[in-house]
Image (cartoon, helix red, strand yellow):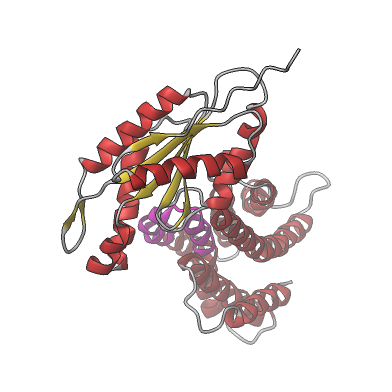
């Protein structure tokens, strides 16, 4: 079992060494690789001690100390992946206390208390792994929840060996010390598999979630892109066919934005876009949605908002942008915007809706920019002849 644990961790280390070779790896993955290397070295050292190659006085203290470090770093890698970088400040004090307790037990009673100390320390460290997996439980994926729940009984099985050795050295009823040792060894092996494949699957899960987010979010302004905005717009087009308050749409375009890029560079242009998004967001409700369609064109969805109220919101946005110069690295940039306003009509499609809003926007541009223009009202239906 010791050799299997050493070989399994070495295999994971070898596979990860060539994964994404030549590129800088995330801190969590680098920490996890170091953790696996420590665990592989520790189990190999204990295996060499078991077959009589390395003496106990060297293999046991060094092997368990390296094993403590490996499991602690594994928990730290998972805390890092969960966005809790403060784990580093607690690692060395906890490691120092664990090593001090183990050495004290080793020199007092080499056989008995050593097993108690190592089992309890490793069990607590594996519970730290489970706690890291359970972090942000409400937003956690089902895979993360499964790994957290499955790790708890395995960690308790490892810790139970130390408790039983201390309380009942001869076992309890049909539970013998040999059975407890076998269960503990099996728990180490299963935790190695869970830790290895689980971490890799969680990394793939995070990557897929990030790709899905980037597919519907603009990377510069972090608001929905064209696809994300249209996805959110679809149900409101369907609701427009039912009676009730209308839904407003504002088409926004920054005036003379090309001069910003030409004069101050694209980094300043990105700063301006982010500042505009921040300014617009302050004028909207939580239920409103701002999206970047293309270039410097934005769209704003105003659920349950009449045309007059939508025009009022658009005018408020125009005034706020005009009154809020953007401070870049090279200059203070004054901005203005043109806005076209309309509401979703029962017979609208995405094409007809944005065609109407775009026509209002072009009228605002033609009239001198820095203004709000509402779309023309629908033509009244002709009465049928008698």
- Is 6 in front, or is 230? 230
Magenta residues: mostly which secondary structure?
Answer: helix
Q: Quadrant of residue 96?
A: bottom left
Is the residue 37 above or below the residue 298 in the image? below
Tell me if residue 74 is in the magenta stretch. Answer: yes
Q: Which residues are magenta?
A: 72-96
Q: Position of residue 312 (x, y in %)?
A: 36, 27
Q: Is residue 137 visible?
A: no
Query: Which image quarter holds the N terminus?
Result: bottom right
Q: Is residue 40 visible?
A: yes
- Is 78 in front, or is 19? 19
Is the residue 18 above or below the residue 71 in the image? below
**Residue found at x 60% / y 83%:** 18
Tell me if residue 375 is in the magenta stretch. Answer: no
Quick one: which residue is furthest to the front in this view?
386
Q: Position of residue 355 (x, y in %)?
A: 54, 44
Quick one: which residue is furthest to the right in this view?
174
- Is 372 in front, or is 92? 372
**Residue found at x 39% / y 32%:** 284
Quick one: which residue is furthest to the top in this view?
386
Q: Position of residue 375 (x, y in %)?
A: 47, 34
Would residue 47 appear left or right of 178 to someone viewing this image? left
């Amino acid at each position: 079992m010791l050799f299997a644990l050493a070989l399994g961790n070495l295999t994971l280390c070898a596979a990860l060494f060539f994964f994404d070779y030549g590129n800088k790896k995330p801190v969590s993955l680098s920490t996890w690789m170091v953790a696996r290397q420590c665990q592989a070295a520790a189990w190999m050292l204990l295996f060499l001690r078991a077959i009589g190659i390395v003496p106990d006085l060297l293999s046991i203290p060094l092997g368990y100390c390296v094993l403590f470090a490996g499991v602690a770093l594994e928990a730290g890698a998972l805390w890092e992946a969960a966005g809790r970088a403060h784990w580093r400040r607690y690692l060395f004090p906890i490691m120092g206390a664990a090593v001090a307790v183990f050495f004290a037990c080793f020199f007092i009673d080499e056989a008995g208390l050593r097993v108690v100390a190592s089992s309890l320390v490793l069990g607590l460290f594996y519970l730290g792994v489970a706690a890291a997996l359970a972090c942000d439980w409400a937003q956690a994926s089902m895979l993360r929840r499964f790994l957290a729940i499955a790790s708890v009984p395995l960690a308790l099985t490892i810790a139970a060996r130390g408790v039983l050795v201390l309380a009942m050295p001869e076992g309890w009823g049909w539970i013998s010390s040999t059975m407890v040792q076998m269960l503990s060894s099996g728990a180490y092996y299963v935790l190695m598999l869970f830790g290895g494949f689980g971490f890799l699957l969680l990394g793939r899960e995070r990557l897929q979630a990030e790709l899905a987010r980037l597919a519907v979010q603009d990377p510069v302004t972090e608001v929905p892109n064209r696809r994300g905005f249209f996805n959110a717009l679809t149900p409101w087009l369907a609701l427009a066919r039912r009676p009730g308050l209308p839904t407003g749409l504002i088409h926004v375009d920054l005036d003379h934005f090309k001069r910003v890029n030409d004069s101050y560079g694209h980094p300043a242009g990105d700063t301006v876009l982010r500042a505009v998004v921040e300014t617009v967001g302050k004028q909207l409700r939580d239920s409103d949605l701002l999206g970047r369609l293309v270039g410097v064109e934005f769209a704003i969805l105003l659920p349950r908002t009449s045309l007059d109220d939508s025009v009022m919101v658009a005018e408020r946005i125009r005034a706020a942008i005009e009154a809020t110069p953007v401070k870049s690295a090279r200059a203070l940039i004054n901005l203005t915007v043109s806005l076209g306003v309309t509401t979703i009509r029962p017979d609208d499609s995405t094409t007809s809706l944005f065609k109407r809003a775009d026509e209002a926007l072009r009228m605002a541009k033609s009239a001198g920019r820095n203004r709000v223009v509402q779309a023309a009202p629908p033509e009244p239906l002709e009465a049928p002849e008698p």
